[in-house]
Image: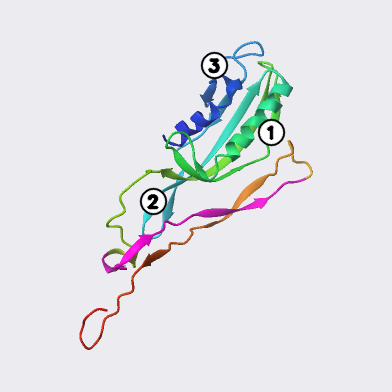
């Protein structure tokens, strides 16, 4: 699953929507028919890029969620279900073998009443950073750890294991006394590329013989 497919899969777990999860727009609905429902806005996002490696499998994707209900009370109730669902996607694979969500932040929800067609709306803007689709198992034999770039790179030999980096991003708490719903509000701060660790055997060379020990 890509991010959009996985997001839909997660949102459909809110039974009150009865699978009424729509991209960009929805079929005609009014206070007596076709509600509640949810509209989401997503995109292909912006692929991360590093010096020397080019574009990576990780992405940053902004998006929007719109919760539509026939009453104010219902809209508030659904919002209280959707926000924990969204923030709960962080630090796990979403959907069925979808992307691994490294970071998820959202802005203060905005509540509106639309005279036509007489429905209540909660608008939530979010931003997410994730890795691409994760392969659950892969043979590690032949994996190398190199220092340098291109043809000048040198392999570190006699390794038993190599860990993958754990990328992270700090958050800034921007909760105020005017924050609604009892939820903290956070925004993304500096990103950390993480560290790589490896274990193996030390092999020294005797300079007078050229033999290894």
User: Taking 8 as reference, is 156 left or right?
Assistant: left
Badge 3 or badge 1: first in the primary sequence: 3
Question: Does the magenta-highlighted stretch encompass residue 161?
Answer: yes
Specify the quadrant of the image occupied by residue 180: top right
Q: Which residues are magenta?
A: 151-176
User: Taking 177 as reference, is 174 left or right?
Assistant: left
Bin the neighbour count of mark 3 within 10 Å (Cα to Cα): few under 14, some 14-19, many 20 and up: few
**Camera-side residue: 89 or 4?**
89
Q: Residue at x 70, y 48 (%)?
A: 174
Q: Residue at x 46, y 46 (%)?
A: 59
**Camera-side residue: 198 or 74?**
198
User: Taking 106 as reference, is 72 left or right?
Assistant: right
Label 1: state its secondary structure.
strand
User: Taking 158 as reference, is 120 left or right?
Assistant: right
**Pointer 3 residue:** 27
Badge 3 or badge 2: first in the primary sequence: 3
Name the disc covering residue 157, or none: none
**Where does the image place residue 12, in percent across and percent down from the top left?**
53, 26
Quadrant of the drawing holding the C terminus: bottom left
**Pointer 1 residue:** 110
**Pointer 2 residue:** 55
Specify the quadrant of the image occupied by residue 39: top right
Label 3: state its secondary structure.
loop
Q: In the image as oriented, which residue stretches furthest toward the right?
A: 177
């Amino acid at each position: 699953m890509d991010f959009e497919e996985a997001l839909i899969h997660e949102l459909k777990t809110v039974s009150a929507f009865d699978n009424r999860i729509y991209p960009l727009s929805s079929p005609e609905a009014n206070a007596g028919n076709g509600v509640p429902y949810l509209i989401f806005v997503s995109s292909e996002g912006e692929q991360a890029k590093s010096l020397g490696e080019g574009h990576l499998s990780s992405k940053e994707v902004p998006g929007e969620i719109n919760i539509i209900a026939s009453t104010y009370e219902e809209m508030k109730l659904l919002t209280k279900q959707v926000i924990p669902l969204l923030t709960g996607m962080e630090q796990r694979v979403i959907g069925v073998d979808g992307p691994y969500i490294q970071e998820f932040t959202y802005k203060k929800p905005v509540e509106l009443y639309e005279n036509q067609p007489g429905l209540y709306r909660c608008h939530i803007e979010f931003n997410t950073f994730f890795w691409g689709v994760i392969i659950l198992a892969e043979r590690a034999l032949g994996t190398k750890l190199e220092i340098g770039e291109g043809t000048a790179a040198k392999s570190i030999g006699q390794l038993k294991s190599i860990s993958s980096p754990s990328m992270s991003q700090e958050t800034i708490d921007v909760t105020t006394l005017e924050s609604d719903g009892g939820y903290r509000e956070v925004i993304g701060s500096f990103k950390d590329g993480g560290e790589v660790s490896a274990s193996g055997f030390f092999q020294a060379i005797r300079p007078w013989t050229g033999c290894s020990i």
